[in-house]
Image (cartoon, rainbow, N blue to C red):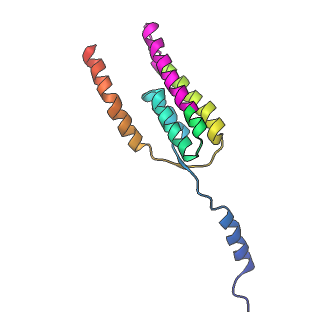
Amino acid sequence: MEDSDPQLTDSAEMNKGNSEVLPELYSKRVIYIFSVIFSTIFGTVLLMSNLKQVKDNKARWEVLAFGVIFTVGSAITLTTVQLQTNLGIPLNILGAVILNEFFWNRSIGKDAEFEKKSWHKPAIISALITLPFAIALFAAG
């Protein structure tokens, strides 16, 4: 007398092979929003965290170099080119697009599957870092 159903056993075996653990990453949308609202360097930190999760140290260094160079270059551009319009947001959008469309797609994969990591803690930290600068800017101007 056979105790197990062959179909159930086959199904269980198939599911056993598909039970890989997905990495917990900040989504492209979160990286984009943080880059635009706070600065490209904040999106850089989130993407670096993702790259640490997928164990791509080379890409982490590349993203860090890009983030620092882009942020410093943006700051120099904004102080040198004193236009009436604010170029900060368009530059942050450009930085966000480069982080997601170039670095994410190349290092993590455009269609990579992952679990979404909560953005609440980075939002609080980013706000606490940014708030004193915003207050000083308004107080000075």
Give the image location of residue 68, x and y in percent: 49, 25
Magenta stretch, main secondary structure, is helix
Out of 10 and 43, give the one closest to the viewer. 43
For the point 47% across and 29% down, the residue is 41
Write down the region rendered in magenta.
Answer: 62-88
Q: Is residue 43 left or right of residue 20?
A: left
As for residue 9 lying within the magenta part, the answer is no
Q: Residue at x 48, y 35 (%)?
A: 45
Residue 89 seen from this side: yes
Residue 30 rendering spot, x and y as whole percentages:
49, 38
User: Measured along the vertical axis of the image, is residue 5 above or below residue 20?
Assistant: below
Evaluate whether residue 83 shows in this view. Answer: no
Which residue shows up at 55% across the image and 38% down it?
Answer: 28
Q: Quadrant of the N terminus?
A: bottom right
Q: Position of residue 80 (x, y in %)?
A: 45, 7
Residue 20, placed above or below residue 134: below
Q: Is 140 located above or below residue 63 in the figure?
A: above
How many numbered marks have been drawn onto this rendered protein structure?
Answer: 0
Is 77 colored magenta in this rendering?
Answer: yes
Tell which residue pokes out farthest to the left in this image: 139
Left or right: residue 128 compared with residue 92:
left
Q: At x 40% / y 43%, what residue is drawn?
A: 120
Q: Work out which quarter of the rendered image holds the C terminus and state it.
A: top left
